[in-house]
Image (cartoon, rainbow, N blue to C red):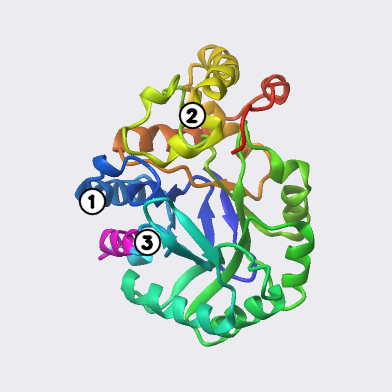
Amino acid sequence: MRRIQLVGSQRTFAAVGIGCMGMSWGYDELGRDEDESVAVVRHAIDLGVDLVDTADQYGPFTNELLVGKALRGRRDDVLLATKGGLVVDDPATYRSHRDGRPEYLRAAVDASLGRLGVDRIDLYQLHRVDPEVPIEESWGALAELVKEGKLGAIGLSEVSVEEIGRAQAVHPVASVQSELSLWSREALNDGVVEYCGREGIAFIAFAPLGRGFLSGRISSPQDLPKVDGRHRIPRFQPEAISANQAIVDRIRQLADRLGATVAQVAIAWVLAQGEHVGVIPGTKTRRYLEDNVKAGSLVLAPEALAELAALPEAVGAR
C-alpha cells in the first residue's frame, strides 16, 4: 500500500486509514460495542493501518476516549488525528455550531489531549471554518500549539481553495479532509483535490463508501439500523435510495469482473484521484476492515476509471 507524506512533518501514513466516528456517533446507536470497536482499531494497526482519525464532536467526546483506550500500548504505531471546532448543541439531533475562536481551540486541544491520554496529537484538524472568526485567527492559534509541541501538524476540513490559501499564508497546511466518493465528487469539481496535489498537501477522504451506501449492502431505509442518523439524510430517503441503486449496480458489475467487492472498487476509485489522496473508511467490524484494507492494493485500469467516471450523479443532498 502506498504511503502519503504529511507536509511540514517527517511523518507518512498508509493510504487506507480508519475513521472512528461511527463507533460512537451518527450510526447504529443501539448496536455500539466499545470492546469490539477497540479490537477493530487494534486489528487495523496489525494490518498496517496507521492513520487513526477521530474528533471531539463524536459522542460528543466519547470517541476520543474510545480511541485513547484502543491506543494504549500502541501509541507509537499510529499517526493520531483528531479534530476540533464543532460544538455539539443537541446530541439527539446531531445539531452543532462552529467555534473557531483561538481561546476555544486552545481549550479544545487541551481537552482532547486529556481524553486521548497523550501529550501530543500528530495531526489536529480544524473541523469547520467558523464564519464569525477569520481563518487566520483560528489557524494562528493552532500554529502556536504546534510551536509549543502539543500538535505535530495541522489540517483543515471541508474548506475551499481560497480558505486553504489564506491558512497557508499563516502556517503550512498539512492536510485537507473532505468527503469524496463515487457519489460525492464536490472536492474534485471545486478544485480542492487538484490544489492539494499541486501544493503537496495530503487529501484525506472521509465517507469514501458514501456512509455505507457504496458498500452495496443498503437497498432501502429498512436496511439501516432502527436508530441511525442516516435516516435524517436526504440521500437515504426511500426515493433517493431507489434511484441511487443504479450507481451501486454499475459498480458491482465492474467489481464482479475484477474479482473484487463493491466497497473495494469504491475505495480504489478514491485512491486513484492522486498520489496524495488517502481514505479513512469507517467500520465497526473486523471483516469489513479487512475488506477495506485490501482495497489499498487494487489498481483500477484506465478503462475501469472511465467507466466509473460515467456513473450518474447521486439523487438527494449528502
Identify the residue shown where x is 43% and y is 58%: 54
- Foreground residue, 259 or 162? 162
* Residue 300 in which image quadrant: top right
Left or right: where 41 falls relative to 253: left
What is the spatial separation of the Cα atoms under label 2 and label 1, in whole angstroms?
A: 23 Å
The span picked out in magenta is 62-72
Q: Residues within 10 Å of mark 1 (few under 14, many from 20)?
A: some
Q: Does residue 69 appear in this view?
A: yes
Q: Mark 1 points at which residue?
A: 34
Identify the residue shown where x is 31% and y is 33%: 226
205 lies above or below 56: above
Q: How crowded is mark 2: few (under 14 residues within 10 Å), some or many (20 or more)?
A: many
228 lies above or below 128: above
Q: Residue 60 carries which label?
A: 3
Instruction: Specify which label sits upstream in the sequence, 2 or 1.
Output: 1
* Residue 136 pos. (x, y %): 71, 77
Q: Mark 2 points at which residue?
A: 213
Residue 92 inside the magenta-drawn segment: no
Instruction: Specify which label sits upstream in the sequence, 2 or 3.
Output: 3
Q: Is mark 1 on a helix, strand or loop?
A: helix
User: What main secondary structure does the magenta stretch of the protein show?
Assistant: helix
* Residue 165 pos. (x, y %): 78, 66
* Residue 268 pos. (x, y %): 57, 33
Q: Do the residues labelled 2 and 3 touch (CB within 8 Å)?
A: no
Q: What element carries label 2?
A: helix
Residue 71 inside the magenta-drawn segment: yes
Q: How crowded is mark 3: few (under 14 residues within 10 Å), some or many (20 or more)?
A: some
- Foreground residue, 108 or 72? 108
Q: Residue 3 carries which label?
A: none
Q: Does residue 11 appear in this view?
A: no
Identify the residue shown where x is 52% and y is 74%: 152
